[in-house]
Image (spheres, rainbow, N blue to C red):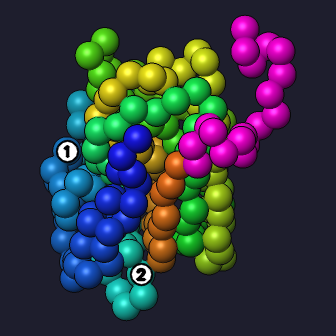
């Protein structure tokens, strides 16, 4: 397995930290390499503004009119093969204007099509700056396992006005052969 997670940290996340942002974001267009928002422009009007400050990755303010079916922040990771038992780990230092549990999923484009793997843990952010972790152990029923694919980490953003501050972020994978599952294995998890 190539370490797309380390490459992502050294490349796009480093570029995001170095960027001097003060711009309105465009739907499905990267504002730094491999990082872009996406939203349902048919059901809602969304205005996202990205700014950066010293010692932060990015601040994103969202103004939402209507109810979009989706509003996400996407991180293109690259291609690799993931295995049953691999543990995906996301560490973030940040905050939101109101406490929120943001759903996470990995969108994977493989030879079989596009699959979304929902993480068991949400990304929990509060109004106070803090460090939070989310984990997902890949299970046998996750369609992305054992198939080469291009992966995108997707964070569901609130579908109402919000303010998100990301100060630091680290995404990594603990290979299954290290035996560090984020959930206990049971008979039903193997069925």
**Quarter of the figure with the N terminus:** top left
Q: Residue at x 41, y 81 (%)?
A: 56
Q: Which of the two marks, 1 or 2, is nearer to us in this view?
A: 2
Q: Residue at x 75, y 19 (%)?
A: 189
Work out which residue is located at the far front of the displayed protein and give it.
Answer: 177
The disc label shown at residue 70, or none: none
Q: Is residue 72 above or below residue 5?
A: above
Residue under circle 2?
56
| Closest to the observer, 28 or 2 | 2
Residues drawn in magenta: 174-191
Q: Is residue 184 above or below residue 122?
A: above
Crowding around mark 1 (Cα neighbors within 10 Å: few <14, some 14 to 19, many 20+) is some
* Residue 137 within the segment the image draws in magenta: no
Visible residue check, residue 16: no
**Quarter of the figure with the C terminus:** top right
Side of 47 where 162 appears, left or right: right
Visible residue check, residue 29: yes
Q: x, y percentage for residue 96?
A: 55, 66
- In three-dimensional space, the C-alpha distance between marks 1 and 2, rounded to whole angstroms, equals 23 Å
* Residue 179 within the segment the image draws in magenta: yes
Mark 1 or mark 2: whose residue is earlier in sequence: 1
On the image, which quarter does residue 8 sit in?
bottom left
Residue under circle 1?
28
Under circle 2, the secondary element is: loop
Work out which residue is located at the far bottom of the displayed protein and give it.
Answer: 54
Crowding around mark 2 (Cα neighbors within 10 Å: few <14, some 14 to 19, many 20+) is some
Q: x, y percentage for residue 77?
A: 32, 48
Under circle 1, the secondary element is: loop
Q: x, y percentage for residue 108?
A: 36, 29
Q: Residue at x 24, y 72 (%)?
A: 15
């Amino acid at each position: 397995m190539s370490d797309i997670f380390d490459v992502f940290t050294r490349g796009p996340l480093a570029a995001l930290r170095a960027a001097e942002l003060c711009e309105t974001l465009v739907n499905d267009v990267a504002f730094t390499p491999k990082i872009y928002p996406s939203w349902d422009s048919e059901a809602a009007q969304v205005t996202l503004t990205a700014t950066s400050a010293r010692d932060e990755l990015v601040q994103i303010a969202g103004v939402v009119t209507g109810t979009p079916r989706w509003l996400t922040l996407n991180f293109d990771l690259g291609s690799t093969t993931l295995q049953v038992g691999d543990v995906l780990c996301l560490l973030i230092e940040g905050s939101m204007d109101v406490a929120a549990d943001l759903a996470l999923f990995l969108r994977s484009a493989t030879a079989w099509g596009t699959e979304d793997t929902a993480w068991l843990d949400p990304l929990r952010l509060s109004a106070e700056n803090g460090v939070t972790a989310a984990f997902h152990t890949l299970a046998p029923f996750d369609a992305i396992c054992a198939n080469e694919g291009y992966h995108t980490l997707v964070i569901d953003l609130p579908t109402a006005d919000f303010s998100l501050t990301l100060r630091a972020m680290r995404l990594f994978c603990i290979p299954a052969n290290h035996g560090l599952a984020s959930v206990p294995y049971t008979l039903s998890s193997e069925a």
